[in-house]
Image (cartoon, rainbow, N blue to C red):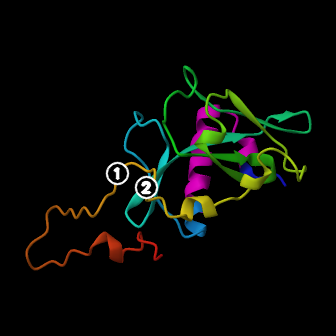
């Protein structure tokens, strides 16, 4: 299946488009996605569940290699070092498929090879694994955000609606 992303030739624009696709698909799965402001965060999105966040790095590929797809898992200076994200979300543009892979499975690698037509492939268990982003992340995830309420320019007669009433809190 071809989709419009195949027409985007500039890698940066295609990456931005893939990030929008991630936000859309995550919302379809009932996930609350937050994008860090600016370009300095070492991850692309935070997905919230019950006040806890997991960090997601989004990558996309159209590059066919030996019957599968090869996707770069590196920043501008080589393979990611340290603990910059919790999950890697890889979008196979020609297949319209997502792989949600725990970071520990790709740590130190410069690329991953994904074979959607092979049932026994190394990363096949992570195909469309959005369930991993819905799990309880209270153990091993940094930082819990109880609540931040912010408002600007409201008078005392205006009602401020808490974010929990706007649909960003997913019931357990």
Q: Is residue 117 above or below residue 155?
A: above
Point 25% across, 61% down: residue? 148
Residue 12 lies in the magenta stretch? yes
Q: Is residue 148 magenta?
A: no
Alpha-carbon neighbours of circle 2 within 10 Å: few (<14), some, or many (≥20)? many
Element on which disc 1 rests: loop
Of marks 1 and 2, which one's residue comes earlier in the chain?
A: 2
Image side of residue 165 versus residue 30, left or right? left
| Discs 1/2, front | 1
In this rendering, would 86 be left or right of 169? right
Label 1–label 2 contact, CB within 8 A: yes
* Residue drawn at 74 percent across, 42 percent down: 7
Residue 108 position (above or below residue 135):
above
Assess disc 1: are there few (<14), some (14-19) or many (≥20) residues with their C-alpha within 10 Å of its C-alpha: few
User: Residue 152: which numbered mark, if any?
Assistant: none
Q: Is residue 126 left or right of residue 149?
A: right
């Amino acid at each position: 299946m071809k989709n419009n992303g195949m027409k985007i030739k500039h890698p940066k624009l295609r990456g931005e488009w893939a990030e929008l696709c991630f936000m859309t698909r995550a919302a379809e799965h009932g996930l609350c996605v937050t994008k860090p402001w600016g370009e300095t965060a070492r991850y692309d999105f935070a997905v919230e569940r019950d006040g806890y966040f997991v960090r997601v790095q989004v990558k996309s590929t159209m590059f066919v290699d030996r019957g599968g797809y090869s996707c770069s898992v590196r920043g501008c200076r080589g393979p990611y070092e340290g603990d910059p994200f919790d999950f890697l979300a890889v979008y196979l543009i020609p297949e319209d498929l997502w792989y949600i892979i725990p970071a520990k499975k790709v740590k130190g690698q410069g690329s991953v090879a994904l074979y959607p037509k092979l049932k026994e492939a190394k990363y096949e268990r992570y195909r469309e694994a959005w369930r991993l982003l819905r799990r309880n992340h209270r153990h091993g995830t940094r930082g819990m955000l109880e609540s931040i309420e912010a408002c600007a320019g409201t008078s005392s007669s205006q009602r401020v609606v808490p974010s929990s009433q706007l649909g960003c809190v997913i019931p357990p």
